[in-house]
Amino acid sequence: MSGAWIPNPAPFPSTPPDRWPAPATPPSAPLPQPGPGRGRGAAAAIVAAAMVFAVLVAGALGWAARRDEDRSETAASTSAPGPTTTPFTFPSPSPSPSTRVPPSSTIPPRSTVPPSTRVPPSTEGPPSTPAPPPGRSQTLAEALPDLIAFVERERGHRFRTRPRVEAIDASAFDAKLRADLERRRGELAKEQVSLRALGQLKPDADLVEVYRGLLEAGVVGFYDPESKELFVQGTTVTAYRRTVIVHELTHALDDQHFDLNRLSRFEGRPDESGFGFLSIVEGSAKRVENAYRRSLSARDRAALAAEEAQLASGVNPFQFPIAVQVRQALPYLSGERLAEALVDAGGIAGLDRAFGHPPTTSEQVLDPAAFRAGEAARAVPAPKADGAVVDAGAFGLVDLQLTLLGTDPLGALDAFEPLEGWGGGRFVAWRGAGGQSCARVHLVGDRPADTEALGDQLSGWASRSGAEVRRVGWVLEVTRCA
């Protein structure tokens, strides 16, 4: 296919329609109590893992960390010392959109949680019960009371019932991870078609095997919203495992107040609410996890960092597709930034409201100001498939940036940044002749000039990837098979 942007006669109206869906401005009224959980759905389990991201992604995280530490140090020099909240780490890209969003935005239920990559500020965070001496392990029974108390203080809510936390051996833990992945094999087969077509996955790559490798690379804990259980690998609680337990305890606490099983309902909407909800869920947990890290002494943090480095040392990040790795990081890092912005603007209540009315677009996750303004996506006509439809739904800003990343790995950081003038998109995927994976995307900017700019940006990617980009009326149409 040509990489040119070809003007075409317009089968659509000469101007774009109004935005959709209705603006998602968080309500001022308190949220209702959560209802009963509804099946496993896409929220089967929420996990924490060791660092498995590629060097390029790690470099991007380090850049943002240094930027945020500089900002923190500047603020510290002009204000009295005291308890602090986690500073912004990243613009927040969000999980997958719509009815089953394009691969680029869907996140497996057991998505990896990247450990903090920035050195916590030297100032102490919220007061907590002293941790054990650096490097010393505890039993789960010894560690749990203090960790529960910390999570309740930092999150601003109390557990309604005592969380169920179980330490299990490595073989039993891995068996649970593999079983959940196998249950999702059919869903991942659809996602694989879209990812291959958009160049985020090689044509011969098996997405199930990619996710299995990511999970086995260092997952040490997860929370299951259906069974209400938190599982930790191993019988002792080390420094790193304590941060994992804090992260997952935050999920358990949020589940008791806001029902995390509602993720499957948000994912059924024709927008990116599923990604928005997951970003709120993970952002809330990252915010508390990083507050716990900051509460530790310098020696404790050094012991924690050493354990993280040891866990990551056995992982070859280049064995995993860069776009998949970045996609895994988005809900945590961008979600943390969004959670911090909500707390800064409206306190804990501001974050709480977002659980009921999450972002409806990945642009809102990346840009907290767009979320506060209720800036919705532009209505875009659904593209037509040239075969039996395998997957279809909203195509968001994150999907675009991860697609561009397929031919430009150095643009990893862009996936965490908002894009001026983004409007909206839809996609469809099908299997083409000879078993090829194919996808077609319709995109628009906020204004005609923004759509033109998107076309210019995509033309370079198209020439490198063999895609076709053309203008169809007021819509950009992107088609690629691989």
Image (spheres, grey):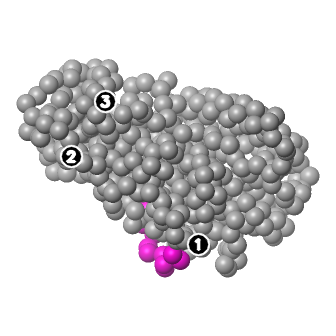
Q: Is residue 38 magenta?
A: yes
Position of residue 206 measured from the top left corner of the image (x, y, whole percent): 39, 44
**Secondary structure of residue under mark 1:** helix
Which segment is the magenta one?
Answer: 32-42
Instruction: Kindly tell me whether residue 284 is visible in this rendering.
Output: no
Question: Would you place residue 22 above or below residue 373 in this image?
Answer: below
* Badge 2 amino acid: Pro
Mark 2 packing: few (<14 Cα in 10 Å), some, or many (20+)?
A: few
Dominant SS of magenta comes to loop
Position of residue 363 measured from the top left corner of the image (x, y, whole percent): 43, 43
- Residue nearer the viewer, 433 or 478: 478
* Badge 1 amino acid: His
- Pointer 3 or 2: first along the chain: 2
- Pointer 2 or 1: first along the chain: 2
- Residue nearer the viewer, 309 or 117: 117
Q: Residue at x 60, y 52 (%)?
A: 345
Mark 1 packing: few (<14 Cα in 10 Å), some, or many (20+)?
A: many
Location of mark 2 (residue): 17
**Secondary structure of residue under mark 2:** loop
Mark pair 2, 1: CA separation = 38 Å
Q: Give the side of residue 311 with respect to residue 345, left or right.
A: right
Q: Residue at x 75, y 64 (%)?
A: 153
Question: Would you place residue 432 above or below residue 127 in this image?
Answer: above
- Residue nearer the viewer, 24 or 183: 24
**Secondary structure of residue under mark 3:** helix
Location of mark 1 (residue): 257
Location of mark 3 (residue): 450
